[in-house]
Image (tube, grey):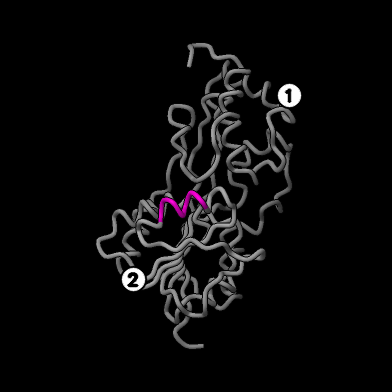
Amino acid sequence: MTDDPTYESLVAEAEAAPTDGWDFSWFEGRATEARPSWAYAVSLAARLDGADAALDVDTGGGEVLEFALSRTATPPRVLAATEAWPPNAARAAQLLRPRGVVVARPGEDGELPFPDAVFDLVSSRHPIRPPWPEIARVLTPGGTYFAQHVGHRSAFELVEEFLGPLPEEVSRDRHPEAEAEAARKAGLEIVGLRVERPRMEFYDIGAVVHFLRKVVWMVPGFTAARYETELRALHRRITAGGPFVAYSARHLIEARRPVAG
């Protein structure tokens, strides 16, 4: 990358980059996001070490689960994962099968293709929409759901650059208390709920384009051509004033299926 890359070259580079899986190494030197203090993948490894049967929901390309399993001394006897998007599912299967993980496709409404009460641990990192009744159904009595979710108005500083000011109600269903209530309605008990807003920095417009291509629900229908005016304006601001700053929303949620009832 040159000392003064042009807008066109940065956007072309970002558009050529693959977006499958949850490998964010492309952003190295281009963007940063602080990580929540609870170190989810490391914490998940400790949970897997004590589990008998584990399921990872919305596993993406399987990278987080594979990382956790690589740090697990005694992996669960039964391991499964679900992923709906075919490119990610193929990547996950390739990465996880050597570790004994069965990768399955969920139903159109999030149905989990497994019998009742078979997993004592269900996990997920950044599920699209947690299927709470299904999670409760496949957990064993006393089993745990342990996950890191994307919260309410995550990175909206960036989203609103393209969509304009959005009402507070947008993404309200992702608010940690709203998700906790949905889990309770499905019959789960909330054991723990922690919330943080890590800082994000985008150092060039290519990082913005790649991020919005990869995290497709942030600005639905995003393309660099469609939002060229907004992108060029943001490019000028970054070039003149330094990185664009936004704040993600993350919460760590732990829920349990009651032993009785």
The reply to whether callout 1 and callout 2 are in contact (CB within 8 Å) is no
Residue type at numbered disc 1? Thr
Nearest the viewer among 102 and 253 is: 102
The overriding secondary structure of the stretch rendered in magenta is helix
User: Magenta stretch?
Assistant: 90-96
Q: Is residue 217 left or right of residue 76?
A: right
Residue 188 visible at all:
no
Point out which mark residue 212 bears. Answer: none
What kind of element bears circle 2?
loop
Give the foreground label among 1 and 2.
Answer: 2
Point out which mark residue 77 bears. Answer: 2
User: Farthest residue toward the bottom?
Assistant: 261
User: Residue 14: percent from the left, percent from the top?
Assistant: 57, 28
Q: Is residue 225 left or right of residue 2?
A: right
What kind of element bears circle 1?
helix
Q: Is residue 224 left or right of residue 33?
A: right
Residue 229 lies in quadrant:
top right
How many marks on residues?
Answer: 2
Q: Residue at x 70, y 50 (%)?
A: 168
Residue 18 visible at all:
yes
Residue type at numbered disc 2? Arg
User: Residue 33: percent from the left, percent from the top?
Assistant: 47, 38
Q: Residue at x 66, y 53 (%)?
A: 171
Nearest the viewer among 173 and 218 is: 218
Point out which mark residue 229 bears. Answer: 1
Q: Residue at x 42, y 70 (%)?
A: 121
Q: Is the residue 190 above or below the residue 164 in the image?
A: below
Task: Say whether disc 1 or disc 2 marks the residue closer to the N-terminus.
Answer: 2
User: Residue 117: percent from the left, percent from the top?
Assistant: 48, 80
Instruction: For label 2, count other residues whose C-alpha is less than 10 Å away and answer few (under 14), some (14-19) or many (20+).
Output: few
